[in-house]
Image: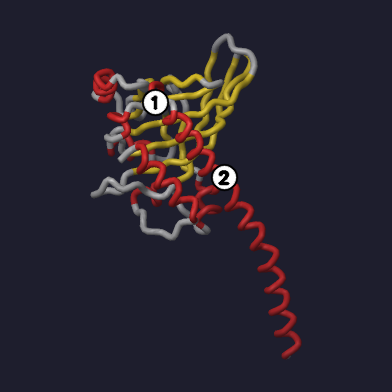
Amino acid sequence: MIRRVLRGAVALAILSLTIMPIRISAQNDEAERVRGSITVFDEIMGARDKAIPASILEKAEAIAIFPGTIKGGFIVGGQHGRGVLGARVEGSRAWSAPGFMTVTGGSFGAQIGAQAVDLVLVIMNRRGLERMMSNEFKVGVDAGVAAGPVGRDASAATDIQMRAEILSYSRSRGLFAGINLNGSSIRSDDDANRRFYGKALRTADIVFRPTLNAPSAAADWQATLEKYAK
């Protein structure tokens, strides 16, 4: 009986040692996605005359970044990307831990080849954020989306803010500008949330109920949002 218990304990210990590295590796993949998003935001905001205007970021309710989104095709194009989203904690101007998101979509036209682009979405109000947190958010259908202005033109930024709930940007080959993403779908990446936080979570759970223990990469993400969108 004792031997049987000991054998069971040893087997459990071996299983735990086998599973633990897998979980750590998976969590590291998501942490790398967070770090990639931070790098994209730092680089975009480092080009002051071509960055997202401060007047927009100060009023933003949420920011989503999709680094290295693949876009391309022949005649029929498509795009797919994985990113992270942070939102203002309700009742304060603090930022939530990162929630993971995916973006997919298609387009038609004379296009050849493929390229990686960085996507940035700036959600301007709570209603836009709540719509994006639905099961599947369709850009241009579920909320007003506009190509966002860049640089220091505060008057243009204010004018667009009044018309759109979400401002969209892209960066490709060093060029940064507003982009039309109408028709793309954005949804919670529940698998990534589970790997990063160690339990089943939707992105809505993270941004609307932000009390949770987050890995250290989350603090870097929050600090970056605070730096540019006080």
Disc sitting over residue 32 in the figure: 2
Would residue 227 be found to the left or right of residue 72 on screen?
left
Residue at 36% x, 54% y: name it: 210
**Hey, which quadrant is residue 153 in on the image?**
top left
* Front one among 105 and 227: 227
Say few, some or many: other residues with alpha carbon within 10 Å of mark 1 (under 14 / 14 to 19 / 20 or more).
some
- Give SS at disc 2: helix
Q: Could one spot residue 35 in this view of the protein?
A: yes
The color scheme shown is secondary structure
As measured in the structure, the alpha-carbon distance from the residue carrying label 1 to the one carrying label 2 is 26 Å
- Give SS at disc 1: helix
**Hey, which quadrant is residue 8 in on the image?**
bottom right
**Hey, which quadrant is residue 117 in on the image?**
top right
Q: Position of residue 88 (x, y in %)?
A: 31, 44
* Front one among 9 and 92: 92
Residue at the spot of label 1: 48
Say few, some or many: other residues with alpha carbon within 10 Å of mark 2 (under 14 / 14 to 19 / 20 or more).
few
Q: Could one spot residue 168 in this view of the protein?
A: no
State if disc 2 and disc 1 touch (CB < 8 Å): no
Quadrant where the N terminus is found in the figure? bottom right
Q: Position of residue 165 (x, y in %)?
A: 30, 29
Please, is residue 193 above or below residue 60 in the view? below
What amino acid does circle 2 point to?
Answer: Glu
